[in-house]
Amino acid sequence: MRKKIEEVKEAYRKDFFIKKIEHIIDIIKCVDQSKIDPFIKESVNIDESLKRLNDKSSYNFDTLIDKYIFANNLLETLENSIIVNRVITTGTIDMSLDEAIEHCKEMSEKCPNGKCALEHKQLYDWLNELKVYRMFNPYNEDQKSE
């Protein structure tokens, strides 16, 4: 009985890491590669990294943990690279409301992950609602920051 419980725990842990890795892969696929800092783009082969993460031939527990750490590091590198590139090209890290609306529209249309696309569509709708609200409430404190 104890052995069966351990087998179930092991299967649950594997499934947990597999789902986490697949989620990170979906996020990475949604990254607009044109916004990645060129230096990072040259040093990180995104397609090769995704192949490595998608390789299911070695899904024992230790390799899953390694893949999960690799996936997280890759995602963090890409996110930081996009921020650096934005600062270099625009001089700021901030995104205007119109830029955020445009970003959400693009992502809702091109993101291969259905959940991600739906979340960007919902955010797109909310940001448009905020924009309309601000147009009819010119004395809103939030608007002064733009």
Image (spheres, rainbow, N blue to C red):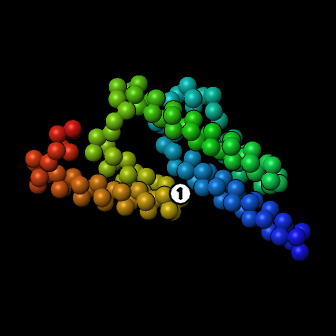
Q: Is 132 or 6 nearer to us in this picture?
A: 6
Q: Residue at x 31, y 43 (%)?
A: 99
Q: Position of residue 114 (x, y in %)?
A: 51, 63
Q: Which residue is mark 1?
A: 112
Residue 121 visible in rendering? yes
Q: Residue at x 38, y 52 (%)?
A: 104
Q: Residues within 10 Å of mark 1 (few under 14, many from 20)?
A: some
Secondary structure under badge 1? loop
Q: Is 113 or 65 nearer to us in this picture?
A: 65
Q: Position of residue 121 (x, y in %)?
A: 38, 60
Quarter the C terminus occupies: top left
- What amino acid type should be assigned to the residue bearing mark 1? Pro
Q: Residue at x 28, y 40 (%)?
A: 96
Looking at the image, the residue that sits furthest to the front is: 2
Residue 36 visible in rendering? no
Please give left or right for residue 53 compared with residue 72 in the image.
right
Q: Position of residue 113 (x, y in %)?
A: 53, 59
Q: Quadrant of residue 124?
A: bottom left
Quarter the N terminus occupies: bottom right
Compared to residue 44, the image places residue 66 above or below, namely below
Q: Position of residue 62 (x, y in %)?
A: 81, 49
Compared to residue 52, the image places residue 3 above or below, namely below
Q: Residue at x 50, y 29 (%)?
A: 37
Please give left or right for residue 51 compared with residue 114 in the image.
right
Please give left or right for residue 23 compared with residue 134 in the image.
right
Please give left or right for residue 81 compared with residue 64 in the image.
left
